[in-house]
Each structure stands twice: as C-alpha cells, then as structure tokens.
Image (spheres, helix red, strand yellow):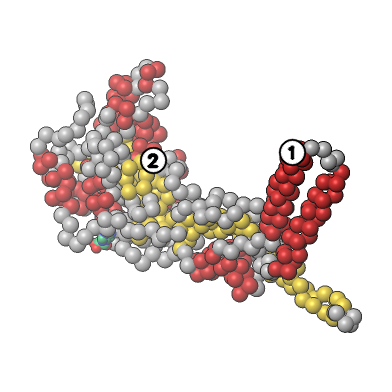
Amino acid sequence: MTMNHKGDDVWKIVQFPPKPNRYLLQVVGVLIILVSIIKAWAQIITLVPNTSLLLGWFIDTGFLAISTILIFRLSRWYLSLFRRDKSRIANNLSYMVSALKLYDEELFETVNSQGEPTREKRIVRTIRILYKELDKKVIVRVMRDGDRFNDQATTLGATIEGALGLEIETTNQTVSFVEYTLLKEKDKRINLNSTVSSVTDSDEIKISGNISYELHKVAHSLIVGGTGSGKSFFILGKIISYLSLTPQADLRIIDPKKADLSLLRFVNGFENKVATEASQICRILRETVELMEQRYATYFNDVSAFGKTYRDFNLPVVIVIFDEFAAFMHSVDKKLSKECLDYVFSIIMKGRQAGVMMEVLMQRPSADDLPTNIRSQMGFKAGLGNMDSIGYNMIFDTNNVDYKTVTEKGGGYIQIDGVHTSPVYFETPMIEKGYDFIGEIKRLMGNGEKQTVNHSE
Ligand SMILES: Nc1ncnc2c1ncn2[C@@H]1O[C@H](COP(=O)(O)OP(=O)(O)OP(=O)(O)O)[C@@H](O)[C@H]1O
C-alpha cells in the first residue's frame, strides 16, 4: 500500500465511513503472529540433530534472525490492514461525504447480543471520491457511476473548495468522472516588470505567479474582451515584455480604430510598422508574409535546418499585433478582407518555425469573425472580463467549464497550449497608475538610436 507522502503522484480513495480503530484486534493479531512463529521455531529446533556446539550456535542464531524478520514483516502487513489515511485532504473529504449525506443506508434485520431480532442501518452505497496530491496542486476526482450521485458530482466544486480551503483552478468533466484541480497556493497577480525572465536565451513570458509560457512553443495568440475589460493594458504590457526580450522582438501594429496602439507610430523604430488604414494594413501583412518566406528561403532551405527554428539562427521574433480584428474584417470590402485573411492564414499556418507570429485581439468572438482553421491554431487564448457561455465556448472550444463572474479589472480566463488542458482564471500583470507606456517603449527602443537587434535582415 502506498504511504501518503506530500507530492505523491498516486490516486487514493477517500474512505467513508472511515475505518474504525480496532486496537484490540491489532494487539491480538500481532500476539498470534508472535506466538505462532516462536512455537514453530521451537518445533523446528527439536528436529535438528544436536551435533557440535559451534554448529548448534550457528543454527540457533540463524533461526532467531529468520524468525525476527518474519515476525516483523507479518506484523507490519497485518497492521497495514487497519491503517487509516489520516491526511487532512482525506479527512476533510470524508467529512464532506458525511455532512452532505453522500451515501445511502438501508435497514437490515439482525439479532442482538440477547438473541432478540433488531433492525440496524448500514451504509450500502457511497459516492466514490479519489484524490491525488501533487507539489502545487490537489486533484479530486468524483466518480460518476450511474447512481444518484452521478449529477451531484458536477455540482460539488464550491463545496470541495470549502472543504479543502483551496481554490479550484480547472474542472474537467467526462462521462465517468468530474475532476477538480485545486491550487495549493493561490495564483498571484504579478507586476509588469517581472513578466520577462532575466535568463539569457529565454523567451519565457510570465503572465501570473503560476502561469508562464515559452513564446516559441505557443506562437499565435487570441485575446478577446469587451470595452473596459483590460485588453489594452494587457497588450501594452505584452508589448513591453516582447520589447524586453533578447533579441528584441520586431513588432508590427495594426490598429484600425486608431486608438492607443496607433500612437506607437510616433516612436522611433516603429516607422512603417504601424497601420491604421485598410491599404496600410494589407501592406504590413503582405510584407510580413514576404519576410516569413524570405526567412524560409535563407535559413530553412536545406536538410541542415532539420528540426531548427528561428531561435537557432538568433533571429528576433516577429509579432503582428492585430487589434479589432473582427471589426476591421467587417468594415472593409470583401476582396480586401479576403486578401488580408489569406495573409493572416498564411502566417498562422507557417509562421511558427520562422518566428513570425500573430496576436489577434477582438471584442467578441464569433465563428464568422474568426474562422475555425485560424482559431484552432492559436496556442494562447485569453478571454477578459465577463462573457456569456457562447463567447467562452467560441474562444476555448469547450463547454465543460464553470466560469466564475469576473470582478477584477484585467481578470479573465486563459488557456495556453502545453500549459493548460482547460481554461483557468487569471489576472493580467498589474500596471501601476500613471505608468508611462509610450515612455517605456521609447526607452526600450533606444530612443530611436540604433537597435541592439542581432539579425541579418
Ligand atoms: N493590468 C492592469 N493593471 C492595472 N489596471 C488595469 C489593468 N487592466 C485594466 N486595468 C484598469 O481597467 C481600465 C480599463 O482597461 P483597458 O483600457 O485596458 O480596457 P479595454 O478592454 O482595452 O477597453 P477599451 O476597449 O475601451 O480600451 C484601465 O484604465 C485600468 O484602470
């Protein structure tokens, strides 16, 4: 039987009712083991012919050692049958089963010690709950066995949170179980200045205390959020993070609404890299596709490039940030929107290896605004602020999540490929009041002095 170590990667069953403490049975059992082995030893010893003194001493010592080991092993096995899972998690979940009466009892006819017939209640069925304790998480799996607890399994989230005093990170519902993943430590909002790792060669971007990802593994992003949800702060924060990478990211900005992002056109180094008009937008996208093709032609043109990415050639990541994507696609004529969409599609399908990425922002996702073949390639998806279930389903392609009301500015749900299996609640990096985005971007761009980007394009 597995012991209950912290961080064990083993499923354990929550015992209900808990095993009773049968001390008398334990003592008697161990005594029987002891006496039987001593008796057996005494019996065997009489069968051994009494030869020399030395041989006799060896035989006695050998039997004594074997008997001691046998007594110890057998007793340990016997006592393990009575062992109770005393962990706080097991105790609290067992208490929850009792408090919510997540078990069925039936009346049984028996005979009491005076020989009179009596009736006694016995537990005949209990909800089946398993749990696993990891370093940073506790996973509670409530089984759906087709009994009356089947539907209850899906509604136990808040009660389990209360019982364990931990917060649910994700809920995963299948036909045979509902799995609640709880965080041992609450996720913490981080400050913008700790979003980029100081480790050289790292392209790790931190989003919160518990959430981070490597940019080259995730590639394209989708950020959705209504007015006031914190979308602009999030993307401006990300721009600061991207510009803090080494080599510094090469950003192209598309802002058809001529809002905050378009102001970057006044920063040295962003000339010709900010587009607000349809024709400029199409030009920026076309040039980015050409750059991508050029990278493939220069760096990935023979077998020596097998398995390599843009990072092996120390090329900067190129990120096209496309704000108000859906609104733009609706506002331009069909021919132009098709041309733009073709460029976006091309980047999304081929960009990752060459380090050419798309970051699409929009107010509300709908199947018409963002075709499924593009949406499914987005490794990073975030929905900020409150959204209806159709909105969430459109972003995350799942309707098995119990989304909480978002009250915090910059709060929402996020799902990153390779990091999460379903969307989790998060809060965007904190940006203090009066933060000078443009000033900071200017500083990172070297105030228009020569950039420190090390590439040959
Ligand atoms: N990460 C954050 N740190 C600190 N404050 C934030 C953060 N995100 C949002 N806020 C607060 O919420 C307000 C609205 O955020 P923001 O302007 O980013 O919303 P939005 O979704 O871009 O809305 P709009 O589309 O109208 O610009 C900000 O002015 C700021 O006060």
- For label 2, the residue is 218
Residue at 51%, 66% in the rendered image:
164
Of the image marks 1 and 2, the number of the one nearer the N terminus: 1
Answer with left or right where residue 144 lies relative to residue 259: right
The C terminus - image quarter: top left
The image shows residue 39 at horizontal and vertical percentages of 82, 54
Residue 433 versus residue 99 in the image, above or below:
above
Residue kind at label 1, given as amino acid type: Leu
The answer to which image quadrant residue 433 occupies is bottom left
Q: Secondary structure at mark 1?
A: helix
Q: Quadrant of ligand 1?
A: bottom left
Between 300 and 32, the one lying in front of the other is: 32
Label 1: how many Cα within 10 Å (few below 14, some 14–19, many 20+) = few
Residue at 70%, 48% in the rendered image:
69
The image shows residue 357 at horizontal and vertical percentages of 33, 37
Between 148 and 93, the one lying in front of the other is: 93
Q: Residue placed farthest to the right in the image?
A: 115
Residue at 47%, 64% in the rendered image:
166
The image shows residue 415 at horizontal and vertical percentages of 43, 50
Mark 1 or 2: in front is 1
Residue at 31%, 30% in the rendered image:
311
The image shows residue 114 at horizontal and vertical percentages of 88, 82
- For label 1, the residue is 54
Residue kind at label 2, given as amino acid type: Val
